[in-house]
Amino acid sequence: MPKGDLRKIINAIHKKLFLSPETFGKPLQSELKGYFRLRIDPYRVIYRIEKERIFVFIVQIGLRKDFIVYLEAAKRLGLM
């Protein structure tokens, strides 16, 4: 991942997820139900929110191409 893209992702996470992770993220379905995605073109950040601790757990960051980022997130979580 290029350094400029990494900086863009980190800035978006700080700006959006620290403020209001539910507002800026979109809920996912199927095997990733309970997780959200944040769109930072051309990347997707897959994350879960734990409200009791105000904790955002980032599962996967990757390119959206052919839904690979979603498949990798599901594999990482042991859902596939």
Image (cartoon, rainbow, N blue to C red):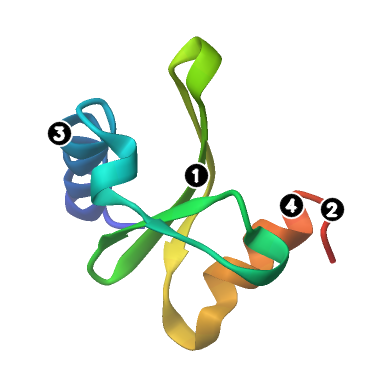
Three-letter amino acid code of the residue under disc 3: Lys
Closest to the observer: 50 or 3?
50
Residue 68 drawn at (x, y percent): 57, 76
Seen in the image, is 73 located left or right of residue 14?
right
For marks 1 and 2 on the same chain, the one whose residue lies earlier in the sequence: 1
**Residue 76: image tag:** 4
Taking 6 as reference, is 38 above or below it? below
For marks 3 and 2 on the same chain, the one whose residue lies earlier in the sequence: 3
For marks 4 and 1 on the same chain, the one whose residue lies earlier in the sequence: 1
**Residue 47: image tag:** 1
Residue under label 2: 78
Residue under label 3: 15
Badge 4 local density, few (<14 within 10 Å), some, or many (20+)?
few
Three-letter amino acid code of the residue under disc 1: Tyr
Badge 3 local density, few (<14 within 10 Å), some, or many (20+)?
few
**Disc 2 versus disc 4: distance between alpha carbons?**
5 Å
